[in-house]
Amino acid sequence: MTNIQHKETAHEAKPDLFAGIDVGAEELILVIRKNGKPFDPQKFTNTPADRIRLVKKLVKLPGIIVCLEATGIYHFDLSLALHDAGVLLMVVNPKAAHNFAKVLMKNSKTDAVDANTLAEYAARMDFVAWTRPSNETIALRSFARRIDALTGQKAAAKNHLHALTATLETPKAVLKDVKLAIAQLQKRIDRLTAEALILIGKHPELEQILVLLIGIKGIGNSSAIALMGELLLLPPDLSHREWVKFAGLDPRAFDSGKSVHKKSRISKAGNRHIRSALYMPALSAKQHDPHVKAYFQHLVNNGKKPLQAVCAIMRKLLHAIHGMLKHNEPFDNTRFYAIPASAE
């Protein structure tokens, strides 16, 4: 037997081991596939003790490839535990897993079916190892998302106050209480923002990114923290187009046959936190940066609705930020959009 034949025989004899884990807020469902056949699903609670038990089980299966979805914050602790234990791990975009299940014509949707689909995804697709984020970037995302949640609560409270002041029947005590709630929320936002800035200040590479981001008109500390909390956790090899797609800012056409031809819209199939973090900076930039303002006017003059033009600015800002961070260069508004000589 030649050396090549020996290698092929050894490869054929090696067990075909893959695992899919459906991650929920309270429960983890594990399905292991061996030689193309799934074993019965196993349940674990999404707690530190049971995550350790699950990791220990998988560590005992050398060479196994594990696949799970990026499901909000719930997959992170398990991903970290698996990665740090040396388990081969893939973390896939939920949209990719959903499309894969459609291709397989999976009619049922249960946690066990989803876990088995993820195991099959690992078996059929090329292995792309999960890149572990640093502890400080994970902490920064927690700050960013908490600040975003409190900002949403403050906006809701301000809307409530506006509604209450529209009628003379609202007692002064009620108005005072809502104003107090708004003030308290702002204090909590300010405190968390200050803590996030302290964290950033301890890491020169993060501080440099912050300086680059706030160099864009419209992006202050809060928006920069929000963007850093999301963008720094993305795989480092993504292109600017992949950033746009991950953020759900990619245009989606609506064409069907000869009768349905709607205007394209953004897909919104990605990370809503990135879109949220870009929205106010885009509005501010189109007011205060002459090149961004000229780009907005150019789009409106060519038939875009104002909201469509703002979405285009968000997408172009994301392109610019990708280049800035990749090349460690400040924002150049002349490259964002060149103002025509006739408009100057």
Image (tube, rainbow, N blue to C red):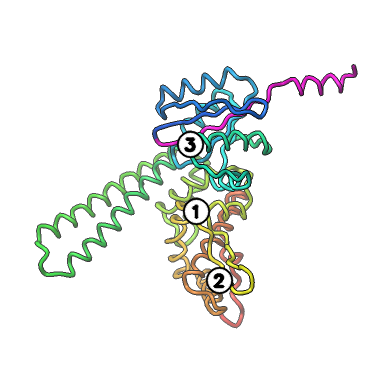
Name the secondary structure under disc 1. Answer: helix
184 horizontally vs 332: left or right: left
Q: Percent position (x, y) of residue 235?
A: 59, 42
Amino acid type at mark 3: Asp
**Residue at point 52% right, 54% down?**
269
Q: Which mark is residue 343?
A: none
Q: Which of 77 and 217 is in front in this view?
A: 77
Earlier in the chain: of badge 1 and badge 3, it is 3
Name the foreground residue: 242 vs 297.
242
Residue extent of the magenta highlight: 1-25
| Residue positioned 50% across, 65% down in the render | 311
Nearer to the camera, 116 or 337? 116
- Crowding around mark 1 (Cα neighbors within 10 Å: few <14, some 14 to 19, many 20+) is many
- For disc 3, the marked residue is 111
> Which x, y percent locates residue 191?
31, 45
Disc 1, disc 3: CB below 8 Å? no
Above or below for 49 versus 178: above
Q: Earlier in the sequence, mark 1 or mark 2?
A: 1
Q: How far apart are marks 3 and 2 (CA)?
A: 37 Å
Q: Is residue 266 visible?
A: yes
